[in-house]
Amino acid sequence: MSELIEQGVIDAEMAAIRPDGDVHPSRSYAPYRSTLLRHPTQPLVVVEDPEAVELTGPVFGHTDVTALDSDLTRLHSGEPLGERITVTGRVLDRDGRPVRGQLVEIWQANASGRYAHQRDQHAAPLDPNFTGAGRCLTDDQGGYTFTTIKPGAYPWRNHLNAWRPAHIHFSLFGTAFTQRLITQMYFPGDPLFAHDPIYQSITDPAARERLIAAYVHDLSQHEWSLGYRFDIVLDGPGATWTEQQEDEAR
Amino acid sequence: MSRQVTAKDITPAQTVGPFFGYALPFAGGGDIAPVGDPRTVTLHGHVLDGEGRPVPDALLEFWQASPEGSRAGAPGSMRRDPVTGAALGRHGVDFTGFGRVAVDADGHYTLRTLPPPADAPYLGIVVFARGLLHHLHTRAYLPGHEDDSLLRGLPADRRATLLAVRERDSVHRFDIRLQGDPGKETVFLEFR
Ligand SMILES: [Fe+3]
């Protein structure tokens, strides 16, 4: 096992990287060491073919989810440990149109910061009443809602004393394969943001903050759960439809 | 009504991380071909890093037109049992056009599908992995269908990275190299 780098070295590397004007992280972000051999070095090839298959995308329906899949606290016989939360929001495409009837998937660590995954050997307890995976379809306004518990922070081996801020992984489909997105939702005020190279890989501060859910008191429920709002705007083109075609298709 | 959004609103990507395996892959995710369809082809290969080593924690997704040319897809790729909530997977009759496969510990994946039509002769592929902060798009072209506008615009050595190689009847190899020299690194795509 090679010797791990100190947090201060990673912090200095992150501080030296200036914003590049891109919303998305650069795939080559050395403070996250696993990127070093896993990012392309040749420029991406731009596809401008209006007939590209990727301008359409997979579809899902009510057979692909069950009603309980969006409540991660009710998938076992007992209640999971932790702080019960509701996470809700809308999924829009980059033209502001709601993404309707599409699949939203989430997965996360339990309240102790442990994943129900064999390779996660963090010395924190598994919770027999929490797996941490859920899914739902967006409604007619592009809305989704999950009930879950707040995940814990967890250590990883990027460097010495590396801890991930608490986060929920999100997987989203738009109306086209070009709009596919996997991201992570964070919680307000996490002291680990400054030290986390995955969060800091988004070099535009405003873009980075869009991954932090808003605590919304009106979404909290009396003696039940704390409410967070996390809206998502997908990047990437879709098939070019006129408003009229869109209305006819409905 | 549409609200005007701008690049200022776009949600940035993050890595899929190492622990997606219990959440995203589903039973039969790599079996796009309806059960027993005689046209079934197998596409398989490795996901490799910049040193040629297998990437054991990558997730691949596939999207393609049906042999008849439909791009509408169909629901039911990840069908669930409404009684137990268990993952059932496809019912094996419809062609949903969508596949999802987590590579194994050797970085290897296998996909069974139907050949795409001649006017869209490729499988769209999205690559997610630990250490990949933003997913990548690429395409696999099956043998015999190697002429389209994207391929014509690429130098020969780069073009070859998108061509599946026939191993035997109906079995084709397609490796994905995340990093390497121009003739080795897979061509990755950007849609604007
Ligand atoms: Fe995580």
Image (tube, coloured by chain):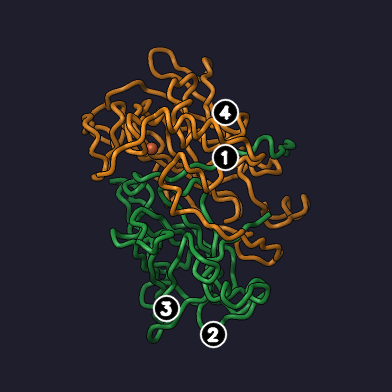
The numbered dot on residue A10 is none
Q: Are marks 2 and 1 in contact (CB under 8 Å)?
A: no
Chain letter of the residue beneath label 3 in the structure image: B
Query: What residue did someone put label 2 on?
Result: B144
> Which residue is at 24% across, 32% downward?
A129
From the image, which quarter does the N terminus of chain A lie in? top left
Disc 2/disc 4 C-alpha distance (Å) = 48 Å
Quadrant in the rendering for residue A204:
top right
SS at mark 1? loop
Disc 3/disc 4 C-alpha distance (Å) = 44 Å
Residue A171 is situated, as x and y percent measured from the top left of the image, at 48, 44
Query: What residue did someone put label 4 on?
Result: A209
Chain letter of the residue beneath label 4 in the structure image: A
Q: Amino acid at mark 1?
A: Pro
SS at mark 3? strand
Closer to the camera in the image, A12 or B184 = A12
SS at mark 4? helix
Residues behind callouts 3 and 4 on a single chain: no
Q: Is residue B62 rendered to the left or right of residue A130?
A: right
